[in-house]
Image (spheres, rainbow, N blue to C red):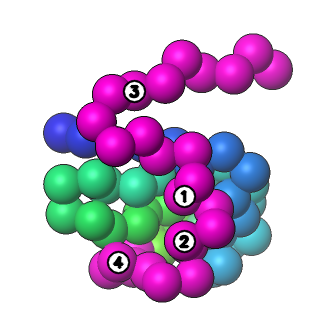
């Protein structure tokens, strides 16, 4: 299990923010609010900039 929430990302299906998770193993984008899934989305390139190469970065305080 290697899932990472994409901060600030908006689901293209349900329109909810911060519901998208990136499965870093399958390289698949999923929404936890609806059943949206996308395999290796190219458009997420800008959004996924928070993804570190190996280690989890500490969550930002909100
Ligand atoms: Zn959704």
Q: Where ligand 1 lies, by quadrant? A: bottom right
Measure the alpha-carbon separation of dots 4 and 2: 9 Å
Mark 2: which secondary structure? helix
Query: Label 4: few (<14), some or many (≥20) within 10 Å?
Result: some
Q: Is residue 10 left or right of residue 43?
A: right
* Furthest-right residue in this view: 62
- Judging by the rendered image, the residue that carries numbered circle 4 is 40
* Location of residue 47 in the rendering, given as x and y in whole percent from the top left corner: 63, 62
| CA–CA distance in space, label 1 to label 4 | 11 Å
Q: What segment carries the magenta color?
A: 37-62
Q: What residue lies at 54% left-to-right and 71% top-to-bottom?
A: 45
Packing grade of label 2 (10 A; few <14, some 14-19, many >=20) is few
Sequence-wise, which precedes: disc 1 or disc 4? 4
Q: Earlier in the sequence, mark 3 or mark 1?
A: 1
Q: Report which residue position mark 2 lands on.
A: 45
Whole-number angstrom distance, CA of label 3 to CA of label 1:
13 Å
| Residue 53 visible | yes
Label 2 with label 1: CB-CB less than 8 Å:
yes
Badge 3: few (under 14), some or many (20 or more) residues near its Cα, within 10 Å?
Answer: few
Q: For residue 50: magenta?
A: yes
In what quadrant of the picture does the N terminus appear? top left
In the picture of the structure, the residue carrying the numbered disc 1 is 48
């Amino acid at each position: 299990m290697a899932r990472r929430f994409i901060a600030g990302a908006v689901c293209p299906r349900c329109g909810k923010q911060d519901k998208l998770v990136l499965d870093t193993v399958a390289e698949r984008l999923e929404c936890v609010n609806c059943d949206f899934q996308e395999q290796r989305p190219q458009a997420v390139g800008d959004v996924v900039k928070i993804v570190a190469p190996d280690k989890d970065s500490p969550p930002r305080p909100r």
